[in-house]
Image: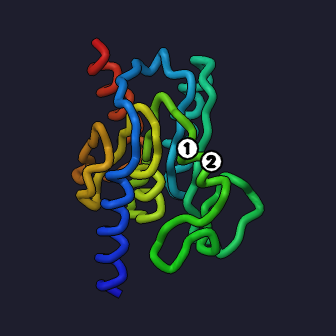
Amino acid sequence: MKLIKNYSRKLLIKRAGEVKRVVRICSPEKVRKAGILWTEPDTKAFNFLQDFFRSKSAIVRNICYSSLKESSESNMLVKKDINWLGFPKNSAIETFIKTDFDLLINVATIPCFALDVIAAMSVASFKMGWDMGGYGFYDLTINVSKNPDSLYLAEQQLFYLKSLKN
């Protein structure tokens, strides 16, 4: 199993290096398209961010990783949507990855390789998350290991994003 994880990680690093994008920091109030990555336990954080960006008239798209084997919702990433290497193989995920978001935020506080793949391959202008795997795919990473709560992570992400623009 360790061999497959190591191979998957190396393959992801290679593919992520091929992604062409321009990094631009956008203040939270000026975000027009936001992408949110989350897992089932992160519902409060997702709702917090969705409400925040929708109140600013932004378009919000999301992908939720679920431990279920199947789901009828298009924004749910489930086990059947992931190949043996851990890479998503769903057309909705490909569309999400190719969308030029002003901001991509990952609020997952548990390791999820499939969400790491989406974040790494995304052409979003600015990417934020907690880089638990040490991949380095985010433009801004916030370590919340002392308080691994997704709502706290989301609040910190908005706080630092506002600070960067000022």
Disc 1 to disc 2: CB gap under 8 Å: yes
Which residue appears farthest toward the top when viewing the image? Answer: 166
Q: Is residue 4 above or below residue 31?
A: below
For the N terminus, give its image quadrant. Answer: bottom left
Question: Mark 1 — residue?
Answer: 98
Viewer-closest of 87 and 54: 87
Question: Mark 2 — residue?
Answer: 95
Residue at the location (50% across, 51% down)?
Answer: 38
Q: Is residue 119 above or below residue 10?
A: above
- The figure's colour scheme reads rainbow
Q: Quadrant of residue 135?
A: bottom left
Residue at the location (64% across, 58% down)?
Answer: 76
Q: Position of residue 54 (x, y in %)?
A: 61, 25
Q: Secondary structure at mark 1?
A: helix
Amino acid at pointer 2: Thr
Which residue appears farthest toward the right when viewing the image? Answer: 72
Q: Dot 1 surroundings within 10 Å: few (below 14), some, or many (20 or more)? A: few
Q: Secondary structure at mark 2?
A: helix
Q: Is residue 141 above or below residue 135?
A: above
Q: Position of residue 112 (x, y in %)?
A: 42, 63
Q: Quadrant of residue 67?
A: bottom right
Q: Dot 2 surroundings within 10 Å: few (below 14), some, or many (20 or more)? A: few
